[in-house]
Image (tube, grey):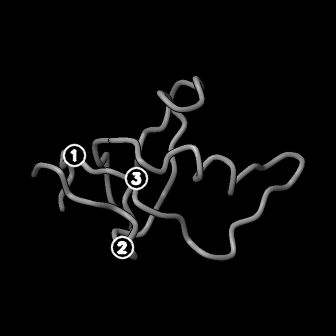
Amino acid sequence: MRVGSKVRVIGIPDGLEDYPDFTSKSTFTKCVGREFVIAGFNEVGMAELDISSVNGSVGETIWIEPDFLELLSN
């Protein structure tokens, strides 16, 4: 996987929770089964995905471990 790779989210990390002002688990759950393009990687190897198409908020991203991604095209 690299920047620009097309991936599908196939799972979510354990331990995610929803809070009144921060709905992490719900947001990640909405992404499962959807396809995204990797926008970048951080220093620990987590992939950045633009999820604007999921929640309608322009520029919103999530960071997710590659173990929860299926590579569709490089």
Q: Which residue is mark 1?
A: 6
Q: Residue at x 29, y 48 (%)?
A: 38
Residue 67 numbered mark, or none: 2
Q: Residues within 10 Å of mark 3 (few under 14, many from 20)?
A: many
Q: CA distance from mark 3 to mark 1?
A: 12 Å
Residue 46 to residue 23: above or below: below
In the image, taking residue 25 as reference, residue 62 lies left or right, namely left
Q: Position of residue 61 (x, y in %)?
A: 50, 43
Q: Earlier in the sequence, mark 3 or mark 2?
A: 3
First reached walking from the N terminus: tag 2 or tag 1: 1
Residue 67 image offset from top left, x and y in percent: 36, 73
Callout 2 amino acid: Asp
Left or right for 55, reference 25: left
Picture residue at 55% right of the left edge, 36% below the top: 60
Query: Hey, what amino acid is under mark 1?
Result: Lys
Evaluate if marks 3 and 1 touch, with contact meaning CB atoms under 8 Å apart: no
- The amino acid on which the numbered mark 3 sits, given as a three-letter code, is Glu
Spot the residue most to the left.
Answer: 74
Against 26, residue 67 (above or below) is below
Tell me the element at label 3: strand
Residue 30 horizontal/vertical position (percent): 57, 44
Q: Give the side of residue 39 with respect to residue 51, left or right.
A: left
